[in-house]
Amino acid sequence: METLSLYELNRLIRITLREGMPDTYWVQAELSEVRVAYNGHCYIELVQKAERGNTLLAKARGTIWANIYKMLKPYFENETGQAFTAGIKVLLQVSVEFHEQYGMSLTVHDIDPTYTLGDMARRRREILMQLEDEGVLTLNKELPMPVLPQRVAVISAASAAGYGDFCDQLVGNPYGFVFYPKLFPAVMQGDRVEETVIAALDRIAAERDEWDVVVIIRGGGATSDLSGFDTYALAANCAQFPLPIITGIGHERDDTVLDMVSHTRVKTPTAAAEYLIAALTDTAAKLDDLVESLTAGVTERMHREEKRIEQLAQRIPALFSVLYTKQMYRIEQIEQRIQTALQQTLIKHTHRLELIEKILEGASPKQILQRGYTITRCEGRVVRDVALLPEGAVLTTEFADGEVKSKRI
């Protein structure tokens, strides 16, 4: 029985693979590891996982030689706006290599960025569909933009040039508008974008009454660092945030998921500042229009009132004459009614007095005496009770035609 050394076996495998698989092949896989060596060579690990359950189905090592890598990496990142890093799906042109000492590996010759773009677009669509199913996709877009968006909560890297450009643009606006920006620091590239931006949003939400809008800006970074803005957690937070969010994260070609759920998307930090300045300019123009309209309205009203007063002034003499005539006629009627009433009252009371006079005349002592009655007095006082008269009292009895004196015995 023929035996082989391990080296001989591996050499046989190398020769067999080279003869059996001499061509290059396009392979779909996910990058699970990307490591660049000091000499410029890039060493990768490719994996394939089951669509359900995330089970590992296959794994292979790969090498991108330095002369290929220095052209392939910028080409891929420029085309996709995605960093060449672990976690993305790629379509690579590879040849199969086998080394007696290091085993099998794949040598990468080319890459097709459209495959990765398609996968990224699919992930974006899935996130947007999930947000739409949850009913939150357009919530932030539906918020009204404040009339005076001057209190601005800014999420950016503290050292970012874009943040400085944004503040300089606000301060140097030609209209003299005053803004009150405050930085809420966050990492704007790399693996911590989602975590730190959400943390900044939480801090702003805790004092939401102090802010009018939120601006998320990023300036000067590579487009390959935008993948951190394509996550479901960040998009869900922004879509449901209670203040309008303006994004200006420094790219022009493709919108990130964050751009798609924010209230307003602009290209750059400077454009975000210009948007806020334009909002105040629009409000100022509307106020000018209102002032002009109010001034015109007041002037027109004053002219109408002046004309009305002139017309009233012209009518006053005639109105006064008519009113005077009517009042004089009314006074004459009242005087006539008073005179009539006085006459009737006078006649009534005159008649009453005449009746009283007749009654008094009938009740006078003279009339009583003439009817045959007498009046007896004692010492000038009328005698009403005989028992009260003392004996010997001198009495005077008055008749209609004279007096008779007598004495009680």
Image (spheres, rainbow, N blue to C red):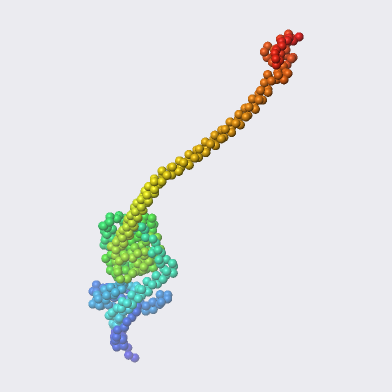
- Coordinates of residue 285 in the picture (x, y in percent): 32, 57
Where residue 203 sits, quadrant-wise, is bottom left
Q: Residue at x 39, y 46 (%)?
A: 314
Q: Residue at x 33, y 72 (%)?
A: 86
Q: Residue drawn 60% across and 31% down?
A: 347
Q: Quadrant of the N terminus?
A: bottom left
Q: How many marks?
A: 0
Q: Is residue 242 above or below residue 33?
A: above
Percent x, y of residue 97:
29, 82
What residue occupies the far right of the structure in this picture? Answer: 409
Tell me the quadrant of the picture where the C terminus can be found. top right
Q: Is residue 31 visible?
A: no
Q: Nearer the viewer, residue 167 or 231?
A: 167
Q: Residue furthest bottom?
A: 1
Q: Is residue 94 visible?
A: yes
- The answer to which quarter of the image holds residue 47 is bottom left
**Farthest front residue?**
401
> Does 308 sit above or below residue 262?
above
Residue 258 lies in quadrant: bottom left
Q: Position of residue 136 (x, y in %)?
A: 42, 66
Give the percent coordinates (x, y) of residue 357: 64, 25
Q: Is residue 252 left or right of residue 240?
A: left
Using the image as rendered, state which of residue 93 and residue 253 is in the foreground: 253
Between 345 and 163, the one lying in front of the other is 345
